[in-house]
Image: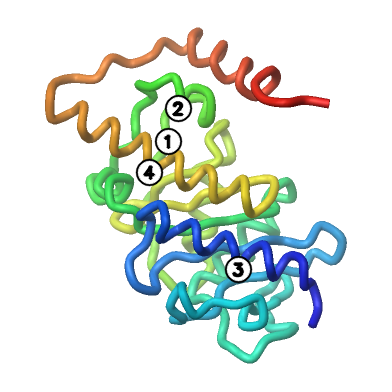
Amino acid sequence: MMLQKLRQEVCELHAELPKNNLVAWTSGNVSGRDPETGLIVIKPSGVKFPDLTPENMVVVDEMGRVVEGDYKPSSDTASHCYIYRHSPHVKGIVHTHSRYATAFAVLGREIPCVTTAMGDEFGGPIPCGRFALIGGEEIGQVVVETLENGRSPSCLLQNHGVFATGKNAEEAVKAAIMTEDNAAIVWTALQIGTPILITPDDINRLYARYQNVYGQRG
């Protein structure tokens, strides 16, 4: 079985989606790209999360052609592959229909940067891209065009949900979790009043500190 370590990682990361209330039933998926071969490991289509194993993950090439696996890959495979082909720095992608973030998506609204955590992680608001139908590359095209000029690793798709990216699959899952957490905070604040925006200068300071100073560094 090829890419055993990446298969294991992607399989285990799928468990984080229901654990963090990001998905319902079989919706949502995680993929990871192997930096050496460029091959992609992705969730099989329509398989329930408790039934996922490293063995039933599907390996595809960057055009979405199955290289190894007994199952049909996710219906979002073409979009994942489009993002990987046009964003060489991306090595992990997550798609969810998480509740609070998708509430902003169905309004076609970005999530404004009103928490320091958003400044840290996203470097500004979480943008919302245009509508696109499922099944082909168009969703991937929207994700690339929505993220290409900003710092956010994730975006909303109008009437759909969340796509999050990362330098590996774990970082993409983290971005998806943080997207939903901040969406819930902003939604709650909107029930009380008008959230106070953080200034661009302060966002820049927050982002620079978190990206370059925070955590353990060699």
Q: Amino acid at mark 2?
A: Met
How far apart marks 1 and 4 lie (CA) works out to 11 Å
The quadrant of the image that shows the N terminus is: bottom right
Q: Between label 2 and label 3, give the one nearer the viewer.
A: 3
For mark 2, give the secondary structure: helix
Determine which of the numbered discs, if any, sits on residue 180 in the image: 4
Q: Residues within 10 Å of mark 3 (few under 14, many from 20)?
A: many
For mark 1, give the secondary structure: loop
* Residue 151 in the figure: left or right of residue 111: right
Q: Which residue is mark 1?
A: 126
Determine which of the numbered discs, if any, sits on residue 118 in the image: 2
Q: Between label 1 and label 3, give the one nearer the viewer.
A: 3
Q: Earlier in the sequence, mark 1 or mark 3?
A: 3
How far apart marks 1 and 2 lie (CA) works out to 8 Å
Determine which of the numbered discs, if any, sits on residue 11 in the image: 3
Q: Amino acid at mark 4?
A: Glu
Q: Earlier in the sequence, mark 3 or mark 4?
A: 3
Q: Position of residue 63 (x, y in %)?
A: 69, 73
Tags 1 and 3 touching, CB below 8 Å: no
